[in-house]
Image: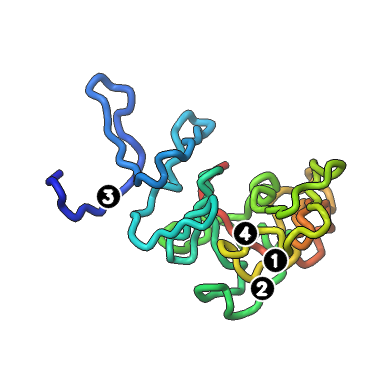
Amino acid sequence: MALNAPHTPQYGDIRMTGHEWGDFLFVPKRLQSVKLKKQPSGRIDLSYLQRGEQGDKKIGQYIDHGNGTVTDTKTGLMWKRCSEGLSGDNCEHGKAEEYTYDDAVKRFKHVSYAGYSDWRLPTIDELKTLVYCSKGVRDKEKESGWCNEGSESPTINQQAFPNTTWWYWSGSPVALNSDNAWDVNFNYGYSNASSRTGGDAVRLVCGGQ
């Protein structure tokens, strides 16, 4: 590397990790406080680092990459800013499409977008991390996530995820062979077991699991 040269670093898995000569990993300064997540295989999840700093903008705990995606610095997950069916810098074009659960599960596997081909439905635990209760969570409803009365609606960071609608499917069934699946209501911030035949919006995620 040359001193003061205009580098554009590329990020990926560290090869030969653990060998005696060691390895180097270059991380943008603004992401150095993010906790690396280990996968079940023992490998480190670096998906949220696979962006250069050019065009990145901090929005609370999220980093807007300027290409329709944001990274959550707390979870390491990368999200599409717009619901499926919406587009534009502020998700102002189109209409949020609704799907039955089974249709959403079939349709949204290994979707390609912004240079990645592993976009998918989030798990219910992943989807719940997007809930933001500006007035806090009701003490008796912490498990399901109801926001206190007076919380801003939709209950999400609206700069990071503009034009968010009410209901969103997760990819998590309530149980095998169940007629219900888990979704989240972003009007009040709670999760719910809903009929698979109902119509919900979809927001895709990349990385994790």
Give the mark nearest the N terminus, 3 or 1.
Answer: 3
Residue for badge 3: 9
Mark 3 or mark 2: whose residue is earlier in sequence = 3
Q: Are circles 1 and 2 on residues that touch, CB within 8 Å?
A: yes
Report whether 157 appears left or right of 11.
right
Residue at the bottom extreme, as displayed: 93
Which of pointers 1 and 2 lies earlier in the amino acid sequence?
2
In which quadrant of the rendered view does residue 101 lie?
Answer: bottom right
- Near mark 4 (Cα within 10 A), the count class, few <14, some 14-19 or many ≥20, is many
Q: For label 2, count other residues whose C-alpha is less than 10 Å away and answer few (under 14), some (14-19) or many (20+).
A: many
* Residue that extends furthest to the right in the rendered view of this protein: 140
- Percent across and percent down for residue 39 are 51, 34
Going from N to C along the chain, the mark reached first, 1 or 4, is 4
**170 or 51, which is in the foreground?**
51
Closer to the eye: label 4 or 3: 4
Do the numbered discs 3 and 1 sit on residues whose CB atoms are within 8 Å?
A: no
Amino acid type indicated by mark 1 = Ala
* Camera-nearest label, 3 or 1: 3
Q: Residues within 10 Å of mark 1 (few under 14, many from 20)?
A: many
Q: Is residue 13 visible?
A: yes
Cα gap from disc 3 to disc 1, whole angstroms: 36 Å
Q: Name the mark on residue 126.
A: none
Mark sitting on residue 96: 2
Q: Is residue 201 left or right of residue 63?
A: right
Which amino acid lies under the numbered mark 2 shown in the image of this protein?
Ala
Amino acid bearing label 4: Asn
Cβ–Cβ under 8 Å for marks 4 and 2: no
Identified by mark 3, the residue type is Pro
